[in-house]
Image (cartoon, rainbow, N blue to C red):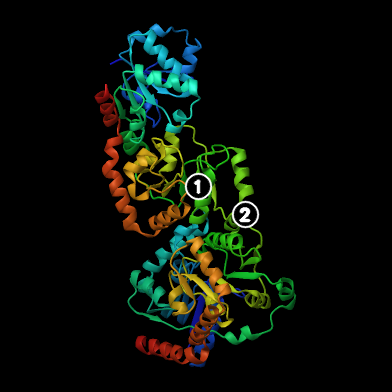
Amino acid sequence: MQIDQIIPEMRYGYEISDIVLTMRKILKDIGFNSDILTEAVQGGKRENIFYHMFTGSKASKTLAGLKAKRKFLFYHGIAPPEYFNNHEVQADLIRGRKDLKTLKNQFTFALTTTNYLEKELHEAGYTRTVVLPLPLDLNEYDRQPYKRLLNKYENGYTNILFVGQITPDKKLENTISIFNYYHKKYNPKSCLFLVGSFAAHPRYCQKLFALIKELDIKNVFLTGRVSFRQLLSYYRLSQVFLHMSEYEGFSIPLVEAMYLKVPIIALNRAAVPEVLGGAGCLINDADFQENARQLDRIVNDRAMREVIIRRQSERVTDFMPAKVLPSCRIALQEIYRFVD
Amino acid sequence: MKFCLISLMPISDTDGKIITDQVHRITQWATIMKGIHYNGFAFDTGFYGLPYEFFDEFDLVMVAVRDAIIEVGIKIKKQSKARVFAFMDGEMEHFTSLPGDQQVKFVELLNIADAVGVTHEYDVPIIKAFTSRPVGMVGVPFPLQKVREEQCPPVEKKQVIHVGCGTGKSFNRNGIVNIAALSEIGLPGVVDIWIREDIEYIRLMRKYMPIPHIDFSYTPRWEDYVAMLNHSFMGLHLDYRQIWGRFALDCAAVRMPCIAPENFYTQKTLFPRLCVNCLDIDGAVKLAKELVKNQSFYEEVMDYAESQLAFFDNEAAKKRLLDLL
């Protein structure tokens, strides 16, 4: 039995590419052959396909030329277009959201990773849906971090971290503004690391640089894309993970931070509370003053830090393959039986 | 009624012509009375080539009193047959801190004028102590209909705070306290000023204070200013002067709340729940955060302001003036 996966493009280190690889392992494990194809595939006939839809997918075009006995949608979330005003990606997002609705009858079943995204599917008219827990291979994160980076920044400073693509929906202007307050009012010996690729949104990145300059804040570092070991170093160096993103369908960096024992302060939006599952510290709005105070509390209150870290460490086990894989296999087998 | 306004508004080509501009400035008195305007200081120096007897042809001359034209008001009353209305233009502190000899002239004008108008109810007992002439709160007429129907349709507000009194550099009317309050609130600000020194001032202050992003904009035309104001979420104007308070009224007209002291007459009337002492940063911050987080509070505040707005409209102001004469 063959179930192939189609993804717009595979890129090393990209969250959804990693999910596709994990899915292939699971599919093979339960007895399916599975190839990974990009959207460059021209027509043809396939037995079963998983189509991975997210920002940048060209679903209508790809699916129009593709014949398959069954098509399954794997929905990863499409960021709301209003965050991307005056940006070329906005048209893609509008089209993506439109495709999600218009293509609903093409799919036998729709899978996704969180209840939040499942709700989006229901709103788009999908009735046969399932939330598939994602197994994450977190053993990788036990590797040695990049020593030179550790040496460079192990200087007694308090480091605040964000990890993720530098895109407008991440609301990094709010992260920077909270840090501005924290740095000037509570702790001048502090740094903010914004770790992630900004290649896709250079104008947004310029805007952030302009804000940093305007606010006259020292010690804000946009690192760009980093190697895996460098990423581990940033987690190791940081005292708090500050996540002000307004749209997350899942969020692997939150899971990483939980695993690597970095206390999280995160905006209570989209799938974030679901991913944290009661762990971390949720905030309800971008009140810079109050959030900076909270940041300071978590940095300095040892007992509070330990409670948060303990809860995060408990929560992260819910994503471990040992816990997730069995239910993931069962879910996939049931879907297949149901539609067969 | 033939009406003339004498003020210290800058000299203009339109001086001596019927004013039709609908703006929230002292000249709005001339607009609603279908009258003309002259700069009082320029008139006295002969700039317009007109004698004081020229005012005989007017039924009413409103003198917008400031120190530089107290004498002009006295001359109009003494050298013409026009009725003179002394309008206290600006903060009461301006008059109470005049040098002694000017205070005598000021009180003389108050006593020979046919009536006296002020911009805050708190001014009434002060002026009444100086004169036996009729004294009343008249304020400045506001072109509400024009603003609502033409210039400022309802728009989606941006989460930015319009700071009413500049930065503290060019107009030092408690500006630094406003900037400090803005920093504590944490929302981006808009300041209607574009002077290099102001931007530099903010830049230097930012080394020590978490001042949020500020948009500096310069809109010399009132119509442009009020259209821009319309896009903000709330106003902040912690000013120490006892004044009319044009800003709070502008805010209410564009459907947004204003945090300011009750020494603005407009603020006291329109936003009694948003009044704070001009140095009360904590109070201002708490109110701002409540407005951001509590939609029903925002709506209640605006519903009340809306219920009071008619008091400030052109016709209501005209009635207050005529009732006093």
Name the residue rendered at 51%, 74% in the picture: A251
Q: Between B272 and A27, which is closer to the camera in this rendering? A: B272
Q: Pick the quarter of the image with the C terminus of chain B.
A: top left
Cα distance between the residues tagged 1 and 2: 16 Å
Marker disc for residue A60: none
The answer to whether any part of residue A9 appears in the image is no
Q: Write down the residue under mark 2.
A: B208
Query: Going by the image, does A172 lie left or right of A326?
Result: right
Q: Look at label 1 and name its amino acid.
A: Asn
Q: Position of residue B170 (x, y in %)?
A: 57, 37
Q: Dot 2, crowdedness within 10 Å: few (<14), some or many (≥20)? A: few
Q: Position of residue B85 (x, y in %)?
A: 34, 20
- Identify whether B240 is placed above or below A207: above
User: Any mark on residue B178, and which?
Assistant: 1
Identified by mark 2, the residue type is Tyr
Q: Quadrant of residue B149?
A: top left
State which chain disc 1 sits on: B
The residue depicted at 42 percent of the width and 12 percent of the height is: B75
The quarter of the image holding the N terminus of chain B is top left
Position of A305 compared to B129: left or right? right
| Front-lying residue, A51 or B111 | B111
